[in-house]
C-alpha cells in the first residue's frame, strides 16, 4: 500500500528551479502582506464597515488560506531533490484546497448579489444587506466549502493505492490523485466533473448573467452616477474571470492537457490570490484612502511612542 506520494514538480532543471524558488517566494510574500493588509484595513477603518468590504475582507482571508495550503510546501520542495508528501498530508491538501475553493465560490456569488442590490435596488440595500444577512452569507460560504470538501474527500479516502505514487504536479488535487488508484477511475473522473465541474460552470454562468444585468442597469443611468459603480464592477468581474477560468479547465474540461494543467494550477493557487488585492486596491478609491489613513495612524503612533 502507498504511504506517501512524490511530486514531480514544475521542472527538472536545477537552474530553472532556483528561478521558480525566488519567483514564488516573492509572490507568496506579496500574497500574505497584500491580503492581510486588506483584512486589517477593513477591520480597523470604520468607513469600510459595509457589506461590500466585509465580503472583500473574507475573500482576502480565503485567498490567503488557499495559497498557504500549497505555496509553502512548493517553495520548500525546491530545496529537496525528492519532493515527498505523506498519504494523510495529501488527503489534507485535497480537503483544504476544496474547502477554501468552495468557500471562495460562494463569497464571489455573494459579492455579485451585493452589487446587484446596491445598483439595481439601492433603496432596499440597507434592509436586504443587513448585518444578519452578511454574517449568514459568510457562514454559508464556509459551510458550503466544508460540505464540498467532504464530498471530494469521500472519493479518495477509500481508494486502493498500490502501484505508482508519482503526482505530476506540485500539490495533491483530486483529478491527479485518483488516476494513481489501482482501479478503473473512469467513473470517478465523471463524478469529479459532475461535482466540481458542474458546480463551477453553473456558478460562473450565473455570475456572468448577474453582472450582465447590472451592466445594463448602469448604462441606463447618468454617466456621473455610474462611473464609480462601473469601476467597482469591473474589478469584481476581473476577479471572477481570474478565479473561474482555471477552475473550469481543471475540473470541468474533459480533455486535460498536462502542461496546461500545471500552468493553470500555478495561476489558481499563487497568481490569482496576489492579483485580487492588487485589483481591489488599485481600482478602489475608498480602499486607497483607508490605507493612507492607516499608514498615517501607524506613523503618528510610532512617533508618539
Image (spheres, rainbow, N blue to C red):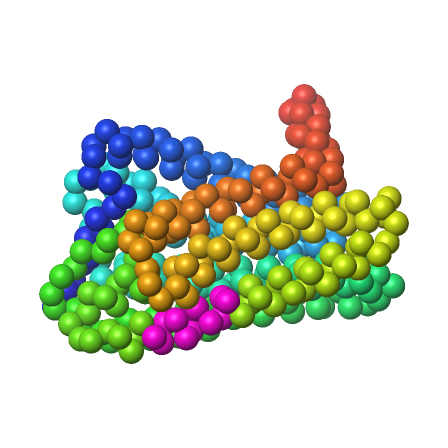
Residue at figure coordinates x 35%, y 66% from the top left = 254
Q: Position of residue 91 (x, y in %)?
A: 30, 64
In the displayed structure, 301 sits above or below 243; it is: above
Please name whichever residue, 54 or 302, is drawn nearer the observer in this view of the structure.
54
Q: Residue lying farthest bottom?
A: 187
Task: Write the start and end of the magenta stretch as one range.
Answer: 190-201
Classify 227 as above or below 200.
above
Quarter of the figure with the N terminus: bottom left
- Depth check: give the residue in front, 156 or 37: 156
Is 193 left or right of 286, judged from the image as shown?
A: left
Q: Is residue 194 left or right of residue 55?
A: left
Q: Residue at x 76, y 59 (%)?
A: 216
**In the image: residue 298, left or right of residue 33:** right
Residue 3 percent coordinates (x, y): 16, 62
Residue at the image position 52 percent from the left and 50 percent from the top: 242
Residue 76 is at least partly visible in this image? yes
Magenta residues, dominant SS class = helix
Amino acid at each position: 500500500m502507498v504511504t506517501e506520494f512524490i511530486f514531480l514538480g514544475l521542472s527538472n532543471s536545477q537552474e530553472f528551479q532556483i528561478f521558480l524558488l525566488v519567483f514564488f517566494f516573492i509572490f507568496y510574500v506579496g500574497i500574505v502582506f497584500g491580503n492581510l493588509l486588506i483584512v486589517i484595513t477593513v477591520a480597523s477603518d470604520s468607513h469600510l464597515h459595509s457589506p461590500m468590504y466585509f465580503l472583500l475582507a473574507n475573500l482576502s482571508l480565503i485567498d490567503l488560506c488557499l495559497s498557504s495550503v500549497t505555496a509553502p510546501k512548493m517553495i520548500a520542495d525546491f530545496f529537496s531533490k525528492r519532493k515527498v508528501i505523506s498519504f494523510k498530508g495529501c488527503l489534507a491538501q485535497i480537503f483544504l484546497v476544496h474547502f477554501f475553493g468552495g468557500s471562495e465560490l460562494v463569497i464571489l456569488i455573494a459579492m455579485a448579489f451585493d452589487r446587484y442590490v446596491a445598483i439595481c435596488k439601492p433603496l432596499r440595500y440597507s434592509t436586504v444587506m443587513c448585518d444578519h444577512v452578511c454574517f449568514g452569507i459568510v457562514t454559508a460560504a464556509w459551510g458550503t466549502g466544508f460540505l464540498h470538501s467532504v464530498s471530494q474527500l469521500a472519493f479518495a479516502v477509500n481508494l486502493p493505492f498500490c502501484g505508482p505514487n508519482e503526482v505530476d504536479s506540485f500539490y495533491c488535487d483530486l483529478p491527479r490523485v485518483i488516476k494513481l488508484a489501482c482501479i478503473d477511475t473512469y467513473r470517478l473522473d465523471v463524478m469529479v466533473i459532475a461535482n466540481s465541474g458542474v458546480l463551477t460552470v453553473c456558478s460562473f454562468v450565473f455570475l456572468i448573467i448577474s453582472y450582465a444585468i447590472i451592466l445594463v442597469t448602469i448604462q441606463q443611468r447618468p454617466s456621473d452616477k455610474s462611473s464609480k459603480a462601473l469601476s467597482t464592477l469591473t474589478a469584481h468581474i476581473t476577479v471572477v474571470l481570474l478565479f473561474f477560468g482555471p477552475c473550469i479547465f481543471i475540473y470541468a474540461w474533459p480533455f486535460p492537457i498536462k502542461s496546461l494543467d500545471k500552468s493553470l494550477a500555478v495561476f489558481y493557487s499563487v497568481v490569482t490570490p496576489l492579483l485580487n488585492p492588487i485589483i481591489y486596491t488599485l481600482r478602489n478609491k475608498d480602499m486607497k484612502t483607508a490605507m493612507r489613513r492607516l499608514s498615517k495612524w501607524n506613523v503618528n503612533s510610532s512617533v508618539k511612542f
